[in-house]
Image (tube, helix red, strand yellow):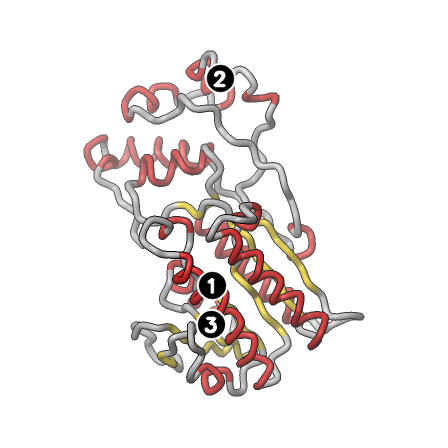
Amino acid sequence: MRILVTGAGGNIGRGLVPRLVAAGHEVVLSDVNRIDHGDLPFHQVDIQHGFGLEKAAEGADMLIHLPAWHGIHWGQKSEADYWRLNVDGTFWAFQAARSQGISRVVFLSSTAWYGHYDKYGFTKRIGEELCEYNRRNHGTRYVAVRPNDLTPWGDDWLNGYGTRLLYGGVDREDVLDCVALAAERLVRPLEGDAEGIIVEALKPPTFTEADVADWESNPEAAFARLFPGYEDLVEIYRLRIQRKPSPSGSRLGWDEVGYAPSRHYGTFLAELRQKHEELGESAVRALRCPY
C-alpha cells in the first residue's frame, strides 16, 4: 500500500516511517523542512497552506497526518499558530486526500482533546471533527490516535522519561505501535459503513486508584509495596516519587486496533537496574533521550 506521511520529520514520523517500510508499504514523505529521506519520495510542503500537497498525495492509498503544535509548544506558539498548523493544516490534508481519491486516514490527535477550550485541545477537537465530517460526507475511513503526554520528548532519561511514565506519560514506542496498528486496521477491506475509530494511546494499566490511595501519606512505603526490590534506586538516583501517581483508566479503541502497550514505570525500573549494574551511576545520570 502506498502511504503518504505528512509531518514525516517530526518525533513520531521519524520513528514510524521505518516501521511502515519494514511492513512492506510504499511510503511517501512530506514535511515543511527538508529531511534525510534516503531513497523515499519526498515533498517539501507547508501544510498550513497546502500548496503542493495534492502532488504529494498522487497515487497514495492512505494518509497518515502527523504535524501539529503540541502542549510543549504552549509558551512559544500563539492561538493563531495552533490554528494554522493544527486546524488549517488538517483541513488541507483532507482536501488533498479527497482530490486524489484517498479514503483512509490516520490522524494523530491527543488526550488534550479533553481540554475542550484551551488553545491546544480545542484544535484537536476540530481535527477530530474534520475526520468525522469527512467520514459522514465523503466516506473517509479514519483512526484518530490520542497519545497522553508522549514520553520522552528530549529531557534526561531518569526524570524526563521515568518520572513521566509514573505520572501518566506513554512511551513513544507504544505510541508508534498504536499508529502502526491504526494504519494496519485501515489496510483491511471495508465491511459496511466507513468506520471512525478513536484510540487512546495510554500506558498499560499496572495499578489502580485503590493501589495508590495512601501514596501521599507515605510515598516510600507505597512505592516499596508496588515496586518491591527497587527501593535502593530511589535513594541512589533521587527518583521523584513524592507525588501520587496516575493510574491508566481508558481502554478506548484498544480492541478495535489491537493496541497492547507494554512500557510502564515497572519496566523503566527494571531497565534502570540493568543499566545501573552494567554502566554505573555516572553513566546512567548522563543518559539523554536519543530523539
Tell me, yes or no, whether the two marked residues, 2 and 3, touch with CB atoms within 8 Å.
no
Identify which amino acid the numbered label 3 is placed on: Val
Instruction: Kindly identify the amino acid type of the residue bearing the numbered disc 2.
Output: Ala
Callout 2: SS: helix
**Residue 9: where, in percent of width, then height?**
36, 67
Q: Considering the image in quadrants, where does the N terminus appear?
A: bottom right
Tell me the residue that label 1 is attached to: 86
Q: Mark 2 points at which residue?
A: 222
Which of the two labelled residues, at mark 2 and mark 1, occupies the earlier sequence position? 1
Of the two numbered discs 2 and 3 in the rendering, the one whose residue sits closer to the viewer: 3
Kind of element beneath mark 1: helix
Left/right placement of residue 167 relative to residue 213 reads left
Q: Nearer the viewer, residue 40 or 194?
A: 194
Q: Would you call the spot at circle 2 few (<14 residues within 10 Å), some (14-19), or many (20 or more)?
A: some
Residue receiving disc 3: 5
Mark 2 → mark 3, Cα distance in angstroms: 44 Å
Which residue is at a point 27% across and 22% down the rendered structure image?
236
The residue positioned 56% from the left and 50% from the top of the image is 113
Ranked by sequence position, the earlier of labels 1 and 3 is 3
Mark 3 residue element: strand
Quick one: label 2 or label 3, which is nearer the N terminus? Answer: 3
The residue sitting at 53% across, 57% down in the picture is 124
Q: Nearer the viewer, residue 32 or 260?
A: 32
Residue 95 visible: yes
Q: Where is residue 77 in the image (x, y as percent from the top left)?
A: 35, 56
**In-image side of 59 versus 235 (left or right):** right
